[in-house]
Image (cartoon, rainbow, N blue to C red):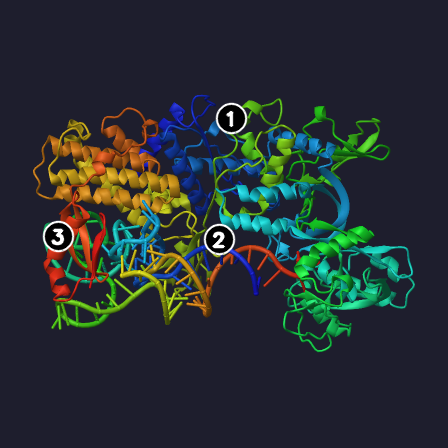
RNA sequence: GCGAGAGUGGCGGAAUUGGUAGACGCGCUGGACUUAGGAUCCAGUGGCGUAAGCUGUGCGGGUUCGAGUCCCGCCUCUCGCACCA
């Protein structure tokens, strides 16, 4: 019988569905295991990245299920977002229609992969039954001041026609449009006060041992906590003071000028009416026109303009000039800095450029720096000088003593500062969850009353050519009644950032149809936290940070008991493939290349680098086509076998072929001997075996042990699969040899075959179900307990020992496993080859490593 | 510049805690079966060497009976952060 994946896979997928095999309930007496993969954006078709991600998850889910855990393994759709709007305009359709069509397509594709999802828990974030609870959470946050509105400088993406969060700006460009430089705009936006939780999120970074180190590091960097001080500098000729934030209060006596960020609101006031006003304001305008990434890039020359004003160094009472400078960041610290050119390279460069004095206040031991002649800043440790009462202190000690001094004089205080900013969640987009707020001219900003939720996104709108949200132009949406005075009012037309939806969807899976609140407490408490979360590294900051924040908020509100949503995180690598380029037609899809030539013009193609699969580079493989050709099992197996999950996977058509061949080999091996195998019961260690069968029996149990460890402890599915391949190879070799077969031999083979089927069933569930059934089993492999290895079966009577002379392998001897060190040594020293290499030289010592080797040192 | 990770055959990748380097797969070579095979099966496959043997995990040192693995110093690549005061 030929291996026919198409038939088998269809059969089992239908059977699983009929039997509701993947449905899961809360069961008090069973240990729960929540396995989650990052849900996809419904773009229309699944890609290899999805397939890899979800295959990894499926193996773990099925494995844990067989280990007896109550496994929650849900799937849903991150269904709001801009692509739906663009596609809708392009295809003359509606985002709603487009999204749900895509969901239907992708769901069918996922089902064909055989993933063990409980589809009863499916959710789509664009469903009012989902986002209404998000709106409720928003209202709670608004009540607590965790959601607030302010007018501020925001990052605007012209391509998206919307504001972006700081986290969504990458290298000065939009995270979605990497060629689109982000512009600064001043506008009203809604924010979530993530900074309130920065300290807590940071502190718990060290309590996530199940997270990859680099993700933790990235989050810590993003939060960017630093210890320093706020210092007040009196403005000369005014009652005002200027606050600066510094981490180097020890160098305060060396501050010889001050710099403002161009956005600083005080700037306008202090230059008003001065001869410098025109210069300063011109500089500000010029600087702000350059986008902030370029402006603050290290290759941009540091520039500034003197404002004409001075402030007093609060320590020395010395008059120091105030500049405005392009490199000072407005959204870090106070937007103004004290500059200490002797001990900061940037300040040094600036001071030399504008002939500002450089005063050394830290001397390295055994050196004598001179501010007039030094050629670069000295940023290391040393002893304070020119610092009044602090002279002679080590500068690190002075950090505290200067801060205390500032506090006692009321001119400053110790503080901590964070780099992270509040999360801008306003999007000037249509396809998103409406922000439940009403503006009344009389009553001001009014939350939509809870009973009026959801604020439903109207579906009967025409999108505007050229982008932009239609909501502000749609009276039926924006016209509202003030909940307080019942007068005419306006609805907020911004929608929420789609990262809000993905910040709590994992909670909602616990009770996806619950309609009395966002979450059914009992169920969410049963399932949360997620035991294993799997997804791409690209979400290291955005989604994972927002989710940690949101979980804390929901915890404060009493919706969930946990503070951390994901106990363990696996970040899988990208799926890569080499690019193929035609000199005439540019990048080519794989099917546009034949025999190394372009099918359009017959030019020889250029093989490019192996990079992440992407439509733009056309180095993509369509999972569905592969499933048509080889079946889902082959595709799943290749995804796991080609490399360990955290590493990038290099796509190889030949590798896929190899996986297919292996499955065929396994199929043939078992079906060819099905009759004989079916007649016997699997060997269970009951009676003693001849050596050659004992070897197979032992190998079976070694394989069970290796596969279990590889899957459970390390997620190294590639080595798990190779271990099973070895077992199959051994069994094949045995059956091809001319050993006489009897019932005992077949029962040992059956034991090996059953182990093979069960061990591989999480990886290739269809073929294994079929074989399992052919062996006479009536229940699914998924319902079978995971095989256990027997310690006795691993015992060996004889071992092959490596014998080294001076650390070089010279011989191998077979000895009884029971030999003592002394006996081993004696045996080794008798070995011909050892005798040859030792010759008549004196043996200095003999090292015996039990079960491994002997090293004879001469 | 700072931080993290990686460097092993022609290729993807193996090698719990220092103990046979190259498992498993791809590719390649030879053979078998075949009308044929790009199917299947068997054998071989790090390099040098007829062989004995030598050599070999980015480079240079070190520790050790023994180092891909540990230590020190470099080089290269990938990723993240990057004027953060």
**Relative to A706, is A851 on the left or the right?**
left
| Quadrant assignment for the N terminus of chain A | top left
Q: Residue furthest bottom?
A: A373
Query: In the rendered image of this protein, does residue A822 appear above or below residue A133?
Result: below
Sequence-wise, the earlier of marks 1 and 2 is: 1
Residue A50 location in percent, x, y?
46, 43
Q: Are marks 3 and 2 in contact (CB under 8 Å)?
A: no
| Residue on which the image places disc 2 | A614
Q: How far is disc 1 from disc 2 in space, using C-alphas?
A: 39 Å
CA neighbours of label 1 inside 10 A, class few (<14), some (14 to 19), many (20+): some
Q: Nearer the viewer, residue A602 or B8?
A: B8
Does residue A232 lie above or below A83 as drawn? Answer: below
In the picture, residue A847 is in which quadrant? bottom left
Please, is residue B17 above or below residue A530 in the view?
Answer: below
Q: Nearer the viewer, residue A616 or A641?
A: A641
Left or right of A268 on screen, residue B28: left
Say which element carries label 3.
Answer: helix
Residue positioned 44% across, 43% down in the render: A53
The residue identified by callout 3 is A827
User: Do discs 3 and 1 belong to a common subunit?
Assistant: yes
Q: Chain of mark 3?
A: A
Measure the alpha-carbon separation of dots 3 and 2: 61 Å
Tell me the residue that label 1 is attached to: A526
Q: Earlier in the sequence, mark 3 or mark 2?
A: 2
Relative to A713, is A125 on the left or the right? right
Which residue is at 65% across, 31% downward?
Answer: A556
Q: Chain of mark 2?
A: A
- Which numbered mark, 3 or 2, is in the foreground of this view? 3
State the SS at label 1.
Answer: helix
């Amino acid at each position: 019988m030929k291996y026919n994946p198409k038939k088998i896979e269809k059969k089992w997928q239908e059977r699983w569905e009929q039997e509701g095999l993947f449905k899961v309930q809360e069961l008090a007496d069973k240990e729960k295991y929540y396995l989650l993969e990052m849900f996809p954006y419904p773009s229309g078709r699944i890609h290899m990245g999805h397939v890899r991600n979800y295959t990894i998850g499926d193996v773990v889910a099925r494995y844990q299920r067989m280990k007896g855990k109550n496994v929650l393994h849900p799937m849903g759709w991150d269904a709001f977002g801009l692509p739906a709007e663009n596609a809708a305009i392009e295809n003359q359709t509606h985002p709603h229609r487009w999204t749900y069509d895509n969901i239907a397509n992708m769901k069918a594709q996922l089902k064909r992969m055989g993933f063990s999802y409980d589809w009863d828990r499916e959710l789509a974030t664009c469903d009012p039954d989902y986002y209404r609870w998000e709106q409720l959470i928003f209202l709670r946050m608004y009540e607590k001041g965790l959601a607030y509105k302010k007018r501020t400088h925001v990052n605007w993406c012209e391509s998206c026609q919307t504001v972006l969060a700081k986290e969504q700006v990458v290298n000065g460009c939009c995270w979605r449009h990497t060629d689109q430089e982000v512009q600064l705009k001043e506008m009203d936006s809604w924010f979530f006060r993530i900074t309130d939780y920065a300290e807590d999120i940071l502190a718990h970074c060290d309590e996530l041992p199940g997270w990859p180190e680099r993700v933790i590091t990235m989050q810590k960097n993003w939060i960017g906590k630093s210890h320093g001080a706020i210092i007040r500098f009196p403005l000369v000729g005014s009652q005002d003071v200027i606050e600066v934030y510094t981490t180097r209060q020890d160098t305060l006596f060396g501050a010889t000028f001050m710099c403002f960020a161009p956005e600083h609101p005080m700037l306008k006031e202090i230059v008003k009416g001065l001869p410098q006003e025109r210069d300063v304001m011109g500089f500000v305008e010029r600087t702000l026109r350059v986008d902030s990434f370029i402006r603050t890039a290290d290759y941009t020359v540091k520039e500034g303009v003197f404002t004409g004003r001075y402030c007093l160094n609060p320590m020395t009472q010395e008059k120091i000039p105030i500049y405005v400078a392009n490199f000072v960041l407005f959204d870090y610290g106070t937007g103004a800095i004290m500059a200490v050119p002797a001990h900061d390279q940037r300040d040094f460069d600036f001071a030399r450029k504008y002939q500002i004095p450089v005063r050394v206040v830290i001397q390295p031991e055994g050196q004598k720096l001179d501010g007039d002649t030094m050629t670069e800043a000295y940023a290391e440790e040393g002893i304070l000088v020119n610092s009044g009462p602090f002279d002679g202190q080590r500068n690190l000690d002075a950090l505290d003593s200067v801060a205390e001094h500032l506090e006692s004089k009321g001119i400053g205080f110790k503080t901590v500062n964070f780099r992270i900013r509040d999360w801008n969640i306003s999007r000037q987009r249509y396809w998103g969850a409406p922000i439940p707020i009403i503006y009344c001219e009389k009553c001001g900003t009014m939350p939509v009353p809870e009973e009026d939720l959801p604020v439903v996104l109207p579906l009967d709108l025409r999108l505007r050519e050229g982008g932009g949200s239609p909501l502000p132009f749609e009276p039926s949406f924006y016209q509202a009644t003030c909940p307080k005075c019942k007068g005419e009012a306006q609805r907020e037309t911004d929608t929420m950032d789609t990262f809000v939806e993905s910040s709590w969807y994992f909670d909602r899976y616990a009770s996806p149809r619950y309609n009395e609140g966002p979450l059914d407490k009992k169920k969410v408490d049963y399932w949360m936290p997620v035991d294993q979360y799997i997804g791409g590294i690209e979400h290291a900051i955005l989604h994972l940070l927002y989710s940690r924040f949101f979980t804390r908020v929901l915890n404060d509100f009493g919706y969930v008991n946990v503070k951390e949503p994901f106990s363990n995180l696996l970040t899988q690598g990208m799926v890569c493939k080499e690019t193929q380029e035609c000199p005439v037609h540019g990048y080519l899809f794989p099917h546009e290349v034949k025999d190394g030539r372009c099918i359009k013009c017959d030019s020889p193609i250029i093989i490019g680098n192996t990079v992440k699969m992407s439509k733009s580079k056309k180095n993509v493989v369509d999972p569905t086509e592969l499933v048509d050709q080889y079946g889902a099992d082959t595709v799943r197996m290749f995804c796991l076998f080609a490399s360990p999950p955290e590493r990038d996977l290099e796509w190889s058509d030949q590798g896929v072929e190899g996986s297919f061949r292996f499955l065929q080999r396994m199929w043939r091996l078992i079906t060819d001997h099905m009759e004989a195998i079916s007649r016997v019961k699997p060997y269970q260690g009951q009676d003693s075996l001849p050596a050659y069968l004992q070897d197979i029996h032992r190998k079976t149990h070694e394989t069970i042990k290796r596969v279990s460890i590889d899957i459970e402890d390390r997620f190294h599915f590639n080595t798990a699969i190779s271990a099973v391949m070895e077992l199959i190879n051994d069994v094949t070799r045995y059956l091809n040899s001319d050993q006489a077969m009897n019932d005992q031999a077949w029962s040992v083979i059956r034991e090996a075959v059953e182990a093979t089927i069960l061990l591989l069933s999480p990886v290739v569930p269809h073929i294994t179900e079929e074989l399992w059934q052919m062996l006479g089993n009536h229940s699914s492999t998924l319902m079978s307990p995971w095989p256990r290895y027997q310690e006795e079966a691993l015992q060996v009577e004889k071992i092959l020992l490596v014998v080294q002379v001076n650390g070089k392998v010279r011989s191998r001897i077979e000895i009884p496993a029971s030999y003592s060190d002394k006996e081993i040594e004696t045996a080794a020293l008798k070995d011909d080859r050892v005798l040859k290499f030792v010759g008549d030289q004196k043996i200095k010592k003999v090292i015996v490593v039990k079960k491994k080797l002997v090293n004879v040192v001469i």
